[in-house]
Amino acid sequence: MMPAELLDRKTRDLAFELEEGRGPKFLIAVCDDATQREKLRETLDTHLSNNGIQMIYVSADSLKRDLIRAVSNRTSSETVQAINIWGIDELDSTGIRQLFVQLNFHRDWLGKLNVPLVVWISTELLNQLTAVAPDFWSRRSAVYYFSERTFDDLLNRLFAKARDEGQKWAPEPVLSSAFETILSSEKQLGICLRNKKSFSITSIDNFIRKIRSGVFQLIEECREGRQIEVALWLWNLSNLDAALQEMLDNLHPERRNLFESLYTDRNEVLLSLSEKLIELLQDHLVALEEEIKHKKLVSVVSRVRATAVSKINRMALALASSVEIPLSSEIEEYEAYYSDLLERSRPEPQENTFLAQAAEDLESWLSGHANKCPSFFSTSEAKLLRFLYSDQLKATVIADRLGISPNMARQKVRYLERKVRLYLGLPPRLPSTRRSARRKLTK
Amino acid sequence: MTDDQKKTLGLLLPNAIPDSGLIVPRGKLPAQLHADIEPSDTTKLLVAGQRGMGKTTELRRLTALLQDSDYLPVFLQFGAQPSITHAGLIRAMGEALLLHRFSKLNVKSFQHFQEWYLREEVTHVVEEGTRGEAGLGGEYVVFSAKGKLEHKSSRKTKKIQKVAKDTRELIIRFNRLIQEVRKRTGKRVVFIVDDIDKVQDSSSIDNTFIHASHFIGEIDSPCIFTVPITYATSSYLRIAALPYTGIYRVPAVELLDPQGQRNHQAFEFMRKVFTLRMPFNPIPQPLFDKVLEYSGGVLIDAMRMFRCICKRVILEPELAVNEQVVLEEFQRLVDDYKFVFDKPSLWQKLSVMCKAVDKQIIMIDDALPELLYKMIVIEYWDRKVWFDLHPAARALYGQHQQVIDNAVRS
């Protein structure tokens, strides 16, 4: 009999588990070297048989198809106090998978045998065991590592194997992969929600999760100081450069000169966008559920585009107001473009929030709670606004106070009304001729 | 080895099934489930949780709570099966009802229920379309041997008609069984179906519980099913209107809150669980708590670590359990986790999650179901659900940060 003191600690521990008595134990012995494995087997056999313990070795090959039958055949004919599954490394990849599936599937039955079960396996296959038989793995009593591999080696092998198997593993640039995930998932989610045939709870959840994960990744990137980069990605995806260019191209040359700087100053929009990007993306995550519930289109790009367009509008209006132009076609032209833009862009909660803030700014200045008038209005306009807010004054009174003719005062009031409407994001009130024309068109 | 030592090693086996005396009440889940089934017979509830979190224990507590009341609790374990169908599920429920010692179910009634399964599926080949002499309207015209004009519709002359067994009829038969038991016993039948989550083919679970969930809704008695953890984390399930009154979760024991502060009640609960299972306990109290902390509130992991420490003391009687011994046992768990990460992307997730300041990144990660399934991420509950990496996974990253980051970047 080999004294227990001569066994190393791990072997002694394993021998103890086998000796200690019956019980539903799943023991995993990890050993890469066949010679060492044989030696261990010999050691354990000698030690245990001297202590009257009867172990059996079942070939992995016999278990891969029908584990219950193969084990039953052996255990019914012999008195068994421990079962060893031997020869897993000799199986081909299909056989190994089959065996692991069987182990996972019949774990309850194996437990009910009430005898220790030792699975002899190599380090190489342990990853596969945890992946294919996770329930079996979770019930393991102990793992004995008879072969030590360095962590570097383990990781290198895993990554190399993944590459060899053609797994799409590459450390992709974070932003491109996040955007790819978001855009493709948004598209697939739309298809899934609208088409019963493509509907699947798993896929929908997967898409929702991917969208959230992607957006959250963008938020994380913003937090790490890459908000301009993220904003630039969104800007490009929104196709805003082309839209701006198109708008300018369609303007009369004189007006184009006036609004030309919108294109050159688009960085200002980009900067403003990047400043509120985290908030914008967080809002998108909040609004996501509601949109899915109502089977609406989910699009982070549309949301960001709407915010950017809103900013461009304000810049355009500021340009228009910086020159003392009478009520004239620049604004009307821009209004036409603006209303068209509004129709094309889906109304977004972000935009409303923004506009609500604008309304609040104006209201608090008019009511005297804030000292600063929104910079959108010139000093003379601000003065007129205050007059109009404090009292319903007639044009003659306004003209008198401002020292201008009543006709000019009426014109100024009308102009100011349009400006306020645009500032508040309200659609322009069309002149009576255009209103009737539109009514006719609608009819 | 003393009897206490032997008993301790036996009770700490992850595969051991504890008897009712070892169950320590945890939380209010049984009471909540009871309150939910009380008002209606149409209540259908789902219970989800990661493996080893105590779903079965909680459902057994519910069964015990419903004994000696107006209910007849029928507990059945669906267990590891390749797949699940409505027919298979209802058959198992019917059989459990018949075998229940207090159901008083008539065998003849059960036979009538079973007849549905004995029917064969029939496939018919039928002729479709119109045929007539000298008619008009067919797309092509043929001359018969008699020289008469005949027409045939070219649209579809044949079709295969499959007469499938009607699930609704099965449910009607099953509901009759339930009504009979109710009449004979004067008690309301409650089905508690455990281990649906252990069915191998997850798409078959979806087919049964999601795509045709109305069949489940038509069962005429309250039912409670354990479902995969993915159902608990499913955004769609929360948004979509399905016939389930609620999804309850059985998370890990929240030993630490999201800010890392100790939850004393949770520690108390875990201590009670293991005191009952460890008549032999060589571990001093502070180190006992340390083991619990290392387990991340996962009972099965705490069990394994405690068992290994007890075993060491049995094998080396002079050994005094100190911090080093506890650390060594935790290291065994960390070593096991090396093999749970079976693909590069999981290592990348670990790296990102360990570095992230905000734990929310875990909650919305696209790989969350896989990470939960592999027990890399653990689900907790403190007024709301939150997730964290298993302490062993976190420790693994801490020990090999540079190697992991290099591999992920390469």
Image (cartoon, grey):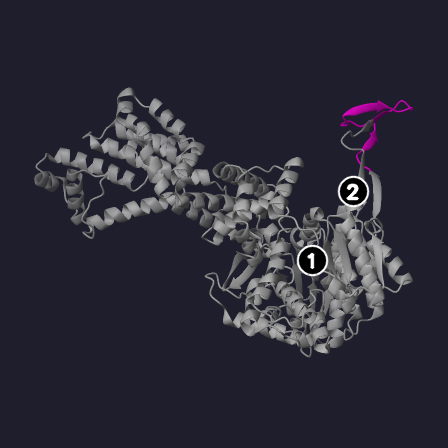
Measured as percent of width and height from the top left, residue A375 is found at: 22, 40
Q: Quadrant of the C terminus of chain A?
A: top left
Q: What is the three-letter code of the residue carrying label 2?
A: Asp
Q: Is residue A208 left or right of residue B109?
A: left
Q: What is the three-letter code of the residue carrying label 1?
A: Val
Q: Is residue A387 left or right of residue A298?
A: left
The quadrant in which residue B84 appears is bottom right
Residue for point 18% across, 35% down: A412
Q: Is residue A133 above or below residue A47?
A: above
Magenta segment? B127-150
| Callout 2: SS | loop
Q: How many marks?
A: 2
The quadrant in which residue A75 appears is bottom right
Of residues B73 and B349, which is closer to you in this image? B349
Of residues B32 and B72, which is closer to you in this image? B32
Q: Is residue B398 visible?
A: yes
Residue for point 30% across, 30% down: A265
Q: Which residue is mark 2?
A: A92
Residue for point 63% across, 74% down: B281
Q: Which residue is mark 1?
A: A143
Measured as percent of width and height from the top left, residue A36 is found at: 76, 51
| Callout 1: SS | strand
Of residues B286 and A297, which is closer to you in this image? B286
Measured as percent of width and height from the top left, residue A401 is found at: 9, 41
The question of residue A435 being in magenta is answered with no
Q: Is residue B173 visible?
A: no
- Subunit ID for the residue under disc 1: A
Q: Quadrant of the N terminus of chain A?
A: bottom right
Measured as percent of width and height from the top left, residue B249 is found at: 59, 62
Q: Earlier in the sequence, mark 2 or mark 1?
A: 2
